Image (tube, grey):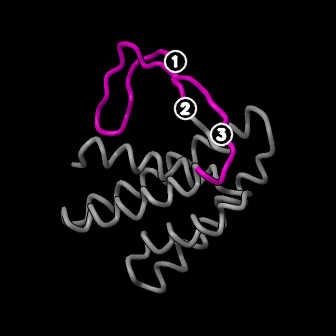
Amino acid sequence: MLVEGLIALAAAGGGAIVQAAGTDAWAGIRSGIARILGRGEAGRERAELERLDQTRAELESAGDGAGSERVQTVLVTRWQTRLELLLEQLTEAEQQEVAAELQALVEQVQTQVPVQSTHNDFRNATFTDSQVLGSGTQHNTINR
């Protein structure tokens, strides 16, 4: 099981991927995430590049509005889960190395993509693994 900090970083990574799609930050995050998830294997890296390109295509197809927000949420969750699964498989030393690489990519996206804010507040929520059970509002920062 991952510590909260790594789960939060995986969530930030998923968000950064979705935020960067269609912006100048895309090329950097695309290659960086593929390298992280590919773990030095060219075939795996190519497969991740294809998944990332599919993500961008899904976002472009979704357009704007409520449907777009749902697609964004699904894609952020999908990439967060992929990053969490990778981190769970690594030794502690490897986790720290990947975490540093992922943090650098997230920061790169944050500096390159304009910020748009949303607020969610999970009062009285229960957190189990990476799921939230409860209700309330939530604040998210979305760089777009």
Residue furthest to the front in view is 111
Marks 3, 1: nearer the viewer = 3
User: Which element type, helix, strand or loop, lies under badge 3?
Assistant: strand
Write the start and end of the magenta stretch as one range: 111-139
Graded by Cα atoms within 10 Å as few (under 14), some (14 to 19) or many (20 or more), the crowding at tag 1 reads few
Name above or below for residue 13 compared with residue 135. below
Tag 1 or tag 3, which sits nearer the N-term?
Answer: 3
Asked whether residue 13 is drawn in magenta, I would say: no
Residue drawn at x 27%, y 62% as measured from the top left: 95
Decide: few, some or many residues near mark 2? Use Cα within 10 Å; few <14, some 14-19, many ≥20: few
Image coordinates for residue 109, horizontal then vertical, percent: 58, 54
- How much space separates mark 2 and mark 3, taking CA atoms? 10 Å
The circle on residue 115 is 3
Disc 3, disc 1: CB below 8 Å? no
Q: Amino acid at mark 3?
A: Val
Give the left or right position of residue 117, taking residue 103 as reference. Answer: right
Q: Residue at x 48, y 85 (%)?
A: 43
- Residue 12 is tagged as none
